[in-house]
Amino acid sequence: MKIPSLRYLIRKTKNTIVRFPFTILIAIVGTIAAFYVIDFNYSEYTDYTNWYHLIMTCTIGLPMFIAITFFSERLEITSFFKLIIRVLGFIFLLLYFLTLPDLIIEKHFVRIVLYFIGFHLLVSFSPFIGFRQHNAFWQFNKGLFLRFLLTLLYAGVLYTGISLAILAIDQLFNADIRPEWYLRLWIIIIGVFSVCFFLTGIPKYFHKLESYNVYPKGIKIFTQYILIPLVAIYAIILYVYFSKVIITQEWPVGWVVYLVLGYSLLGIFSFLLLYPIYNEAQNKGVKLFTKIFSYSLFPLLVMFFIAIVKRVSEYGFTEKRLFVILLGIWLIFINFYLIYNKFTKIKMVPISLAVIAFLSVSGTWNVFKISKWNQKQRLETLLLKNNLLKDGKVVKTSQQISITDDVEICSIITYLADMHGHTSLQSFFTPNLDTVFKTDSARYYSSYEGIYKLTDYMGIEYNLYTPYRENGEIQYSFSCQYETTNMPLKVSEYDYFVNYRSYFYNYDNKQTDTVINTNYTLADSSKMNIAFLPQKGKLQILLNDTTISFDVFSFMNQLINTQKNAKNGYLQVNKKDMILNYEGRKAFYKVMFIYLSGNKNNNSFSIINEIQADILIAVEK
């Protein structure tokens, strides 16, 4: 194999820049913006919003201009019209950049992901819009896929090699190279090198690919001996579960939705990889697999929609559920389409997916508006049910609302604030929510503090969890608040320190008087034993022939009585409230609980499942 000369590499790079000028420009601009973001001083207020907007815009501009280049090249239009199309693309990106709000919330990230996917799908078929060249379409996308894998390999090797070189300089010459340089290196390799390397290997004369009939043997082996067996395994699991649903007449669990999606997409991907040999006489197994897979999909899609409809009926629409529904509808459509066209017109697969990606997040029909409207309707119903709404505005309640309604209200408020911003809740509240959710700077948007204020205003507890029940008992857990966990502790006045952990889960309910003993040999060779009695709620410490017993059940009941949000079963407790002290005749004991969990019936605890604590002991001299 001849090693390419430097002149050849320069010529190829120049041709790539001339062919994809806007794409290369956007890659460089996005890389510079990412460099600038790395150097921000986050301890001080810095308005970096526009730089993040620039990165988001470049993210979708990169695949968009690749698609524009392919489309204009295939039409063989003049340079002037190519420039016009590129300018229109630039105007679209400029409008997108200018319409991005200062406060970026979840829906903006979801939208950019869908645009990113949509434009990448557009790249796959843009050279073949208006052309019925199915083999050329497959060969072109095969080339893109293999070039992408090769780009990842080159980028990975290049980054690893240069990183090790930087590390060697740092270690051998005490260069004190900051970790940010490794991130900068990765960004420039992904943002500039990978883009240029990928684009350099893309063919220009698309029409010639129709007569190109080379089919890589590696793809056939990979699909037939890895992907198809995986599809078969998924099919067996799903049909066994489908049979169980029919026999037991139980609703399918929500998780089956993702398994059906995985099975469907994996099967379609396998068929696309095998497309060139589908009609070959010696590959009858490929045709048999395709037909079995396609027809097997319909019963599973029935189960798919039953599961998602049940979920929607319980919790309403969200963007995630609407995307799942759209994918289900797309699977029905594309399956019928491929069967009707005898599995020959595969270009419709990316075209239809791109249409869904763009339309689902654009226009008056987008998933964000549907989800927000539906969840606000659910919130209004719950507020009216619990007398929390008067004349369309939230009023404070003095009555105790059910744990289920409390969780539902808090979940909807949290969803709306995170996904759609606090302005989506303004219609329910009299106070200006801009002041309630005000942050120190525009850098971050943390809705939780504002949501806590709203729930206090409503007179309810902020609660996102319905307590877990086991055998009719509520499982409680107590853990130190994160901000108080790492508080410094003076240990010089203590003689011994033990980090203690013990677990007990009595699944069969047969053990009744369990004692879990842990023996320690201390620094001065003294012996200590800690006995954990989970059914009796006791923690006993034996040291120097003296046994001290702590009543953990009583301590947990005390926490429930003194802590807010006790009814939800999950309590975040200040570290100072998680301490038990005992002063004996010969020693002082301090047990600082880090985590406790146990089951409680109506009156008292019946078992402790888990205990984590730091134990400090000061022995009288």
Image (cartoon, grey):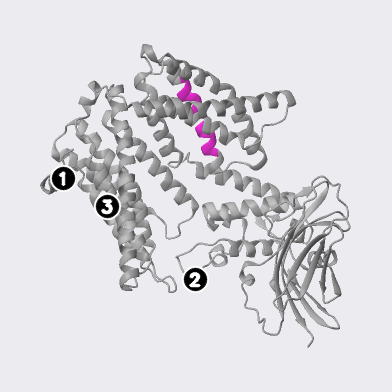
Few, some or many C-alpha atoms within 10 Å of disc 3 (few <14, some 14-19, many ≥20)? some
Nearer to me, 60 or 434: 60
Asked if residue 587 is among those painted magenta in the image, a careful observer would answer no
Q: Residue at x 67, y 61 (%)?
A: 455
**Residue type, mark 1 in image:** Val
Per the image, the residue denoted by label 2 is: 440
**Residue type, mark 2 in image:** Asp
Circles 2 and 3 in contact, beta carbons < 8 Å = no
Provide the secondary structure element on which disc 2 rests: loop
Nearer to me, 391 or 367: 367
Q: Nearer the viewer, mark 3 or mark 1?
A: 3
**Magenta segment boundaries in residue numbering:** 322-336
Per the image, the residue denoted by label 3 is: 192
Q: Position of residue 405 (x, y in %)?
A: 73, 50
Quick check: can you spot residue 195? yes
Query: Mark 2 and mark 3: span between their CA atoms?
Result: 35 Å
Q: Quadrant of the N terminus?
A: top left
Q: Nearer the viewer, mark 2 or mark 1?
A: 1
Query: Mark 3 and mark 1: span between their CA atoms?
Result: 15 Å
Nearer to me, 451 or 14: 14
Question: On screen, 23 above or below 476?
Answer: above
Q: Would you say 545 lies left or right of 446 here?
A: right
Q: Earlier in the sequence, mark 2 or mark 3?
A: 3
Q: Would you say 451 lies left or right of 510 here?
A: left
Per the image, the residue denoted by label 1 is: 18
